[in-house]
Image (spheres, helix red, strand yellow):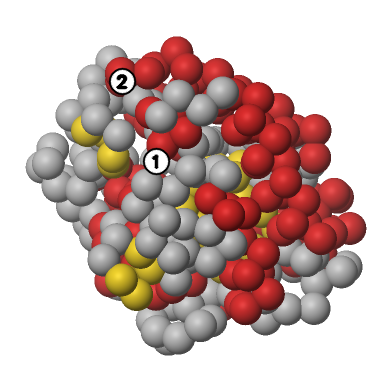
Amino acid sequence: MRNCLTIILLAVPSIGRAQEPSAKPIAEGWDYVAPMKKITAKFRGQEGVVLHVGGSMTIANPYGTWARSGKGKSRDDEAILKWMHTEKKDKTDGWWLCRTEVVPYRAHTSESGLKSAMLFAGGKRGLPTLQKMLDDYKPRMVTIECGIYDIEDGIPLDDYRKNMVKALDEILAQGAIPVLNTVPPFKAQFEKTKQFNEALRTLAKERGLPILDLEREILTRRPDDWFGTLMKRIHLTASEAGGSSGAEPTADNLRKSGYQLRGWLTVQKIAEIKRRVLDGS
């Protein structure tokens, strides 16, 4: 009589492993890998430096909360955050640079009320020009959140487009990778916001650039009730809808905090770009 060995496999949750979120960032629909590999051949800067250039939604502390101290990080999340010098709290740490105020409402790379023309003229509170930031920090990548104040102040779309083209040219000339953020939905100027975002998508497609499509991310998760849950007037929400910017990035939590959604998406997008362009995976 043969001995029979019965093996019972039990599904045991992995200790310390984060719950997987429901989705990755929405894909662009065009190839950015080959064009960005050509650009990075010119890079002579500081490895792992990722600048976050933007207005009040970038200087806001909740934007970087999940990256700095949030719950539910995977090993891959921890690895990319280490590569980004997160919590070094010096000129290599883009999360520190964008939130640490030099004067009220102005940090090293962000300023409340930022409009696209200020990327070249400097901010009203002393924000350096984009070129000065590129020269000072020599970033590998630059995320740009800019446009909602152009929309609110009635800046013509053509002027905005020209300014963003110039900004992209300056970043690309450094051998750095720009990561455009679309403008989150602005209820009072919803149709105009869509026009500005279409211009950003067209620019990114024409130049072969990655884009973090925050407008689509918000409207995909909450197509009918995004206002008051992920957005409030011209800003993202932090905890107003019962969420938290530092919560575990479950599908449900990512629908309750606009800042958590943007912060988590930014980390995932940077990891994706590094993996595909810099590591060749």
Q: How far across and how far down the image is residue 235, in percent?
A: 28, 39
Disc 2 from disc 1: Cα separation = 26 Å
Q: How far across and how far down the image is residue 135, in percent?
A: 68, 75
Vertical comparison of 90 with 13: above or below: below
Q: Amino acid at mark 2?
A: Lys
Picture disc at residue 187: 2
Q: Is residue 26 left or right of residue 60?
A: right
Q: Which residue is at a point 79% across and 41% down the rendered structure image?
A: 208
**Nearer to me, 198 or 37:** 198
Residue 254, quarter of picture: top left
Q: Amino acid at mark 1?
A: Ser
Q: Which residue is mark 1?
A: 22
Residue 100, quarter of picture: bottom left
The reply to whether discs 2 and 1 touch (Cβ–Cβ < 8 Å) is no
**Nearer to me, 56 or 249:** 56
Looking at the rendered image, the disc whose residue lies closer to the viewer, 2 or 1, is 2
Q: Earlier in the sequence, mark 2 or mark 1?
A: 1
Q: Which residue is at a point 53% across and 81% down the rendered structure image?
A: 92
